[in-house]
Image: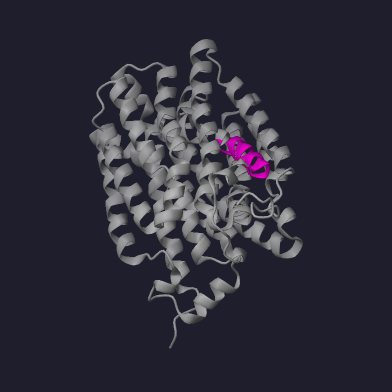
């Protein structure tokens, strides 16, 4: 009896979900360890903001080059290199003894992890038809939110028994296991994989766009892509507050204990995880019914709602209601994550690695700026409210800009390839 038609790409989705989970487990661990790190290394809020942002700056700088490597050499080799590198520097975070050593470890961690999501997305461009890419991306980002959600309680648990350094040593080992199995199973083309039946391969190729001509770097100067990059800047600007400062916010601004802060931070990210899958399903359904333009415009509604929720969280006097508003803001923003990444395939085709790398570069520049805004605002004015109001305005602006992105305007149609 033949295997089910989707066996191969379901297994790929399991691999990439696990990778995304490990990625954010390693990335978010430092947010829960931040109070202990600040105390031991005597760091100010602004210095801790630079520690948070060091990873993201390096990650952003190397996104496009590593996305290009995925286009050229394939995700099998490139993702293996990425995970080995970042796992080593996750573990190295645990031996930091000063601000410069901690910054160095986080910079090298960011360099290593750069390109992970563009290469995951690149694998989807070969293994998934257009009609399934929204859900595929949504599932992967759900993994990231699960990883981010389990990181705070795990770090608190490990720190309570062994200290914060052991937490980073432990998390660094997980990527090595993933690499072993990824290298054995994955192939850059589904046609080369024994688990992919003829029926599944026909289903993949029947729903895929025709192969485009070779891509030049000039293609990344597209105005359409630039607007998408700015939208994603706004999306990730808000996300990085949840990934970095949120546990500290719950403890210092709302009076929760470390365990309570970890639990609430997990709730916020898990809510976002559910929304990423929902958003992926939603954009695929809307595309089938109304076409690309409407189907990929989920953020035009969800991001302004996120902004309003974040502003309410900043203004309310109720700690619990603030947590509910954070969860609402995170969920509504994550509804549009999959559509943003699917647009990269819509407009980029065979340049998926570079196009997603360009978008994620701009997004992570927003992610790098966000912790610094919080850190300096705390240091200069001792205000938690101001950065949240700024974040709400950024979300609203991103939602409005979503209306200007046209997923039907491919780089080929613009004569830019």
| 64 vs 16, nearest the viewer | 64
Is residue 146 among what the camera can see? no
Dominant secondary structure of the magenta stretch?
helix
Identify the residue at horizontal 52%, vertical 22% (top origin): 374
Q: How is the image coloured?
A: one colour
| 325 vs 243, nearest the viewer | 243
| 361 vs 382, nearest the viewer | 361
Residue 86, given in percent of the width and then of the height, sits at 33, 42
Q: In this image, 291 relative to 117: left or right?
A: right
Identify the residue at horizontal 59%, vertical 67% (top origin): 208
**Quadrant of residue 383 within the rendered picture:** top right
Does 167 sit above or below residue 82? above
Is residue 9 among what the camera can see? yes
Identify the residue at horizontal 46%, vertical 59% (top origin): 123
The answer to whether residue 233 is magenta is yes
Q: Single out the residue that lies furthest toward the bottom.
A: 1
**Quadrant of residue 92 within the rendered picture:** top left
Numbered-mark total: 0
Identify the residue at horizontal 56%, vertical 75% (top origin): 203
Question: On the rendered image, what quadrant is the N terminus found in?
Answer: bottom left
Question: Which contiguous range is marked in magenta?
Answer: 222-236
Residue 410, given in percent of the width and then of the height, sits at 66, 53
Residue 282, given in percent of the width and then of the height, sits at 66, 57
Residue 4, given in percent of the width and then of the height, sits at 48, 79
Q: In this image, 121 relative to 194: left or right?
A: right
Does 40 sit above or below residue 200? above
Does 169 sit above or below residue 289? above
Q: In this image, 303 relative to 129: left or right?
A: right
């Amino acid at each position: 009896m033949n295997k089910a038609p989707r066996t191969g790409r379901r297994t790929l989705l399991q691999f990439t979900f696990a990778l995304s989970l490990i990625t954010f487990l390693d990335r978010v661990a430092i947010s829960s360890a931040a109070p202990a790190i600040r105390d031991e290394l005597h760091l100010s809020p602004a210095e801790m903001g630079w520690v948070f942002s060091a990873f993201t700056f390096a990650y952003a700088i190397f996104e496009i080059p590593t996305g290009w490597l995925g286009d050229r050499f394939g995700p099998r080799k490139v993702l293996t290199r990425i995970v080995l590198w970042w796992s080593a520097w996750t573990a190295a975070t645990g031996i930091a003894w000063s601000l410069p050593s901690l910054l160095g470890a986080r910079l090298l961690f960011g360099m290593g992890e750069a390109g992970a999501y563009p290469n995951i997305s690149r694998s989807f461009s070969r293994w998934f038809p257009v009609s399934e890419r929204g859900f595929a991306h949504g599932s992967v980002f759900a993994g990231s939110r699960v990883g981010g959600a389990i990181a705070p309680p795990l770090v608190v648990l490990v720190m309570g028994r062994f200290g914060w350094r052991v937490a980073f040593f432990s998390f660094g080992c997980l990527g090595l296991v993933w690499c072993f199995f990824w290298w054995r199973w994955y192939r850059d083309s589904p046609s080369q994989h024994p688990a992919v039946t003829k029926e599944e391969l026909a289903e993949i190729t029947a729903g895929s766009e025709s192969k485009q001509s070779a891509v030049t770097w000039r293609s990344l100067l597209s105005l359409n892509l630039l607007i998408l990059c700015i939208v994603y800047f706004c999306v990730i600007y808000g996300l990085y507050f949840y990934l970095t400062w949120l546990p500290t916010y719950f403890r210092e601004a709302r009076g929760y204990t470390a365990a309570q802060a970890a639990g609430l931070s997990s709730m916020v990210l898990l809510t976002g995880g559910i929304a990423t899958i929902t958003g992926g399903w939603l954009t695929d359904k809307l595309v089938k019914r109304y076409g690309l333009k409407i189907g990929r415009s989920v953020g035009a509604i969800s991001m302004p709602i996120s902004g309003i929720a974040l502003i309410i969280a900043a203004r309310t006097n109720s700690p619990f209601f603030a947590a509910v508003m954070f969860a609402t803001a995170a969920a509504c923003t994550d509804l549009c994550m999959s559509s943003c990444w699917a647009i990269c395939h819509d407009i980029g085709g065979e340049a998926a690695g570079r196009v997603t790398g360009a978008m994620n570069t701009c997004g992570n520049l927003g992610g790098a700026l966000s912790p610094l805004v919080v850190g300096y605002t705390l240091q200069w004015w001792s205000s938690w409210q101001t950065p949240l109001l700024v974040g709400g305005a950024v979300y609203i602006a991103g939602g409005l800009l979503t209306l200007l992105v046209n997923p039907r305007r491919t780089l080929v149609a613009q004569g830019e390839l």
